[in-house]
Amino acid sequence: MLIHIPGVLTKDELAHCQGRLSSARWGDGRVTAGHQSAQVKYNAQLPEDSEEARELGAIVVRALERNALFVTAALPQQVFPPLFNRYQAGMSFGAHVDNAVRVMPRTGRSLRTDLSATLFLNAPEDYDGGELVIEDTYGSKSVKLPAGHMVLYPATSLHRVTPIAHGVRVASFFWIQSMVRDAGERRLLFDLDRAIVELGQKNPDEPALVKLTSIYHNLIRKWGEI
């Protein structure tokens, strides 16, 4: 399930992130890559412990916490501190699958990567190429979103970033451990929630809303891991 989440960052937040990243010092993106990924990864990355990474990562996390669509789709238990990467002409990231487990840098706790996220931080018109290509059950999906928009997708997916032909692509990326481990169960909960919201908008006095909401929360109790 690929979910496009628009407007994660406000205009002011986006402008602030862009300004800070424009003057940041970038390092080798292979620092956070696994053994196989490091062989196909060619990009720049903001050092995890840099002042900019900590500041901007906190902005992204606060934006996620207030975004109802993200919370509904991910049902997040833990979010890995957001990282930031930069691709310029000739850079790319070949086909790979993200590591199943990540260690949280400040707590040392393990995080199971159920979902991957890419938050685009500059306009698609700023660069040629640089599409995020995700393989799913129905084939390849190419993603290139407006600045401030995010795509959420299963971390089990084979995915890649196509070579940059011209310009610069800047994004934040991170992983989420969901309260609901199973992707099929997460999808059912997401669809049920969207149906409840749609029904509530059309007919807020519909008696079935209470029963459907009860079913939704009872399924989270049944499937959720706290």
Image (cartoon, grey):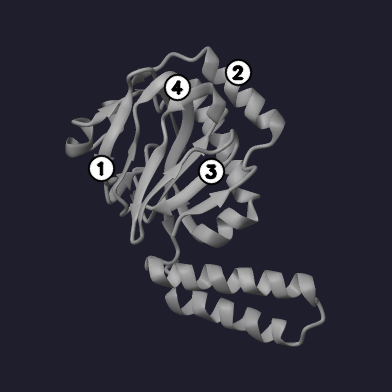
Q: Report helix, strand or loop for mark 2.
A: helix
The spot of residue 155 in percent (x, y) is 35, 52
Whichever of callouts 4 and 1 sits on the residue coming sooner in the sequence is 4
Whichever of callouts 1 and 2 sits on the residue coming sooner in the sequence is 2
Choose top left, top right, bottom left or bottom right for residue 50. top left
Q: Amino acid at mark 2?
A: Gly
Which residue is at a point 53% across and 60% down the rendered structure image? 73
Q: Report helix, strand or loop for mark 3.
A: strand
Q: CA distance from mark 3 to mark 2?
A: 19 Å
Choose top left, top right, bottom left or bottom right for residue 222. bottom left
The spot of residue 129 in percent (x, y) is 41, 28
Q: CA distance from mark 4 to mark 1?
A: 26 Å
Answer yes or no: do the residues labelled 3 and 1 have beta carbons within 8 Å? no
The spot of residue 67 in percent (x, y) is 63, 51
Disc number for residue 96: 1
Pick the front one: 210 or 158: 158
Disc number for residue 150: 3
Answer yes or no: do the residues labelled 4 and 3 have beta carbons within 8 Å? no
- Foreground mark, 4 or 2, reads 2
Whichever of callouts 3 and 2 sits on the residue coming sooner in the sequence is 2
Q: CA distance from mark 3 to mark 1?
A: 20 Å
Whichever of callouts 4 and 2 sits on the residue coming sooner in the sequence is 2
Q: CA distance from mark 4 to mark 2?
A: 15 Å
Whichever of callouts 4 and 3 sits on the residue coming sooner in the sequence is 4
Whichever of callouts 3 and 1 sits on the residue coming sooner in the sequence is 1
| Residue corresponding to mark 2 | 19
Q: CA distance from mark 1 to mark 2?
A: 31 Å
Query: Where 30 falls versus 70 (above or below)?
Result: above
- Foreground mark, 1 or 2, reads 1
